[in-house]
Image: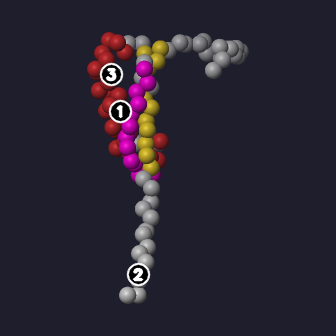
Amino acid sequence: MSDESVEMEGAAPEVEIEVATPMILDMGKTKAKQIKRLKKGKGPLMDEVVGILDEVADALGDELDGKMMVPIVILYKEKKKKKRTRIRFPF
């Protein structure tokens, strides 16, 4: 990223927010339906992400004051299983 700034007329004043160290959440293999729900901010995966954010916020306590937490969620989409064809021998 560059250090250039863009000024716009009537724009809101620039506010600086300190960002805490990004958290990487590895959710493992996940079905496509659950991924769609997570993108919408719903479902069990979203509940798990919010729960982890709450735990980290409690653990950090005063260290987190004035900082914004940034979760990075890693998901794996389950692949469809391929059917194995067996070759049958005539003998």
In which quadrant will I find the N terminus?
Answer: top right
Q: Earlier in the sequence, mark 3 or mark 1?
A: 1
Mark 3 lies on residue: 57
Q: Quadrant of residue 38?
A: top left
Q: Amino acid at mark 1?
A: Val
What's drawn in magenta, residue-wise? 21-34
Residue 62 x %, y %: 32, 12
> Residue placed at 43% from the left, 16% from the top?
67
Q: Earlier in the sequence, mark 2 or mark 1?
A: 1
Q: Is residue 32 left or right of residue 64?
A: right
Residue 75 x %, y %: 43, 42
> Residue placed at 45% from the left, 56% from the top?
79
The colour scheme used here is secondary structure
Q: Give the class, few, some or many, for how many residues have Cα within 10 Å of label 2's Cα (few <14, many ≥20).
A: few
Residue 30 x %, y %: 40, 48
Q: Which mark is residue 88?
A: 2
Mark 1 lies on residue: 50
Q: Is residue 20 left or right of residue 3?
A: left
Q: Quadrant of residue 11?
A: top right
Q: Residue 59 in magenta?
A: no
